[in-house]
Amino acid sequence: MLENNWWHEAIIYQIYPRSFFDTTNNGIGDLKGIIQKLDYIESLGVNTLWINPITASAQVDNGYDSSNYTKIDPLFGTEEVVDLFFSETKKRGLKVIYDFPLNHTSDQHMWFKEALKGPDNPYRDYYVWADGPDEGLYPNNWTAAFGGSAWTKEMNGDQYYLHIFKKEMPELNWDHEPLRKDMAKVLNYLIDKGIDGIRLDAFIFIDVDKRFPDKDPDMETQDLIEYGENLKKYVKELKASVRARSKDIFVIGEATSADAQRIDEYTQEELLDGVITLSHFTDNDDLKIDELPEMNQHVPLDFDKFKRTQKAIQEHLADRPGPILFWNNHDRPRSPQKYGDMDNYRDETAKMMATLLYLQKGIPIIYYGEEVGMNNSGFEDPSNISDNGALSFYESASELGWSHDKIMKNLNLTVRDASRGIMQWSNTKWSGFTEDAAPWIISHQEATYNVEDQEKDENSILNYYRKLIELKKQPLFTRGGWKLLDTEKKIYAYKRNYEGTQANVFCNFSDEERVIENIVNASDDQLVLSTHDAELKDQKMVLPAYSAFVFVSE
Ligand code: NOJ
């Protein structure tokens, strides 16, 4: 299945446009900024870009609240710049994936403004409505992902509209055929414009239980709004329409809760070509305390569970291009700082984690800045954080006696704002991101962990990433078989094999030196990439803290 599609070899670089490079000196990154940095992106060796939404938006959720799917937001540029962007990326052989928030629009979208005119308006059924309750405040007790009820009453009428995210992001009604047809038109437009791939944002929510039953107290709202009975039908229809326009469009879906089984189920020719899940972030939730909201309590990774999850996902997708592999994105704090030790082993942590994940079978997504070991933003004041719940977490934790530093550490390692800091281009006031306008998000200047400094250092994280990406392009790593080796807890070791060539990858995910025995069938001259020199003797090998070693043999 899917044997010869371009995405089998895709190595994706994800850009959060607001934070990448500002050419207008207003503190917000823009599309021209991305164009200006294409040489740099190309120099990494990646072949695909995924950019977070740049189409017109009320910017309540940084572009995920779309007010027009086919126009660029003036914040990011003009239509001419979009055309230039596509011609420049195509010239360089770089594929482009757009984000497509298809589950909701902005309340500023023309469709919603029309829908608000009343039940007879042709756009009314583009959204999900319920009558006012006989008793209580809302049609049911569903809660929105960003807090509060999932329902808001319309201003000039008696009905309520559903919003799984913010109230400014009304849910679209995919049961309504004219809406589905309009969405297919949007995709056709984008395909004609030049996209090579599309990420279906939050697609698992497009078919909620329209009987709107109350959830019982032990139930997550999720059970009533995810993976509805018509979901596959709608995804199939959309995929068929995309394929009819172009055979070569990579269609990925964001399914945050999907486990291996679910990823397998949806990664099918007639459905999706890839699934983005968050289920491999196996935080040790048992360590959380009941007195505080779960969401902002930082806990370490449950590494055993991480291994089991990786194994299950790899094995389920063994006959396909493999899973989507990523440590970082715009919805989570950056993982090296969250799970590794960026205080004492910053270079090692960054290099080892990338090696561990990306040389497995699958399609890597490198989130801007991780290639120079960028950390999270490091907020010092909870009121600078836009994530819901940050302030109230601060208050509750203070009442429990937590210190300011402890609370801020927990917030900085759990809120999504933390990962959205400006790209660190150089060791200058605003890290070379903008000239003198203060960036839109709190930022700190850092020596060494920026592109300019790391270009000069052969052993930098940046140059390690380049070598890793080069290696990843070999069929051994894109197409080869994968097998997890049985090792002690904090070691992650696997084999890859392809037509007689073999790779052994050994990683130590701990701050202690470890020794592995018996599984090392390798010699110094087979070492193709590593964080340290190899100490190999009699099938034994020393793995220093946060080290990674890659051996390849014929
Ligand atoms: C997932 C996106 O990645 C996130 O940033 C956004 O807020 C929600 N979907 C809603 O569109």
Image (cartoon, rainbow, N blue to C red):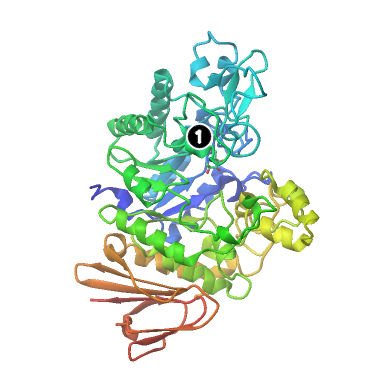
Rendering quarter of residue 411 = bottom right
Q: Give the percent coordinates (x, y) of residue 56.
A: 56, 31
User: How many numbered marks have been drawn onto this rendered protein structure?
Assistant: 1
Q: Residue at x 45, y 62 (%)?
A: 306
Residue 205 location (% of width, % of height): 47, 34
Across and down, in percent, residue 200 comes to 44, 38
Q: Is residue 343 left or right of residue 402?
A: left
The answer to whether residue 536 is above or below residue 467 is below
Please tell me which residue is depicted at 60% across the width and 35% down the height of the picture.
143
Given residues 443 and 183, the one toward you in this image is: 183
Q: Is residue 385 visible from the viewing direction of this image? A: no
Q: Amino acid at mark 1?
A: Glu
Q: Give SS at disc 1.
A: helix
Query: Is residue 400 visible from the viewing direction of this image?
Result: yes
Q: Is 404 displayed left or right of 446 in the figure?
A: right
Q: Ligand 1 within 8 A of label 1's CB?
A: no
Q: Is residue 433 left or right of residue 527?
A: right
Which of 392/423 is in front?
392
Report x, y in % for residue 64: 55, 37
- Mark 1 is surrounded, within 10 Å at the Cα level, by few (under 14), some (14 to 19) or many (20 or more) other residues, namely few
Name the image quarter holding the C terminus: bottom left
Splitting the image into 4 quarters, where does residue 239 fall? Answer: top left
Q: Is residue 524 above or below residue 199?
A: below
Q: Which residue is mark 1?
A: 80
| Residue at point 53%, 63% (across, down) | 301
Q: Farthest residue toward the left?
A: 499
Q: Quadrant of ligand 1?
A: top right
Near-viewer residue (6 or 406): 406
Location of residue 365 by image quarter: bottom left
From the viewer's side, name the closer residue of 381 and 552: 381
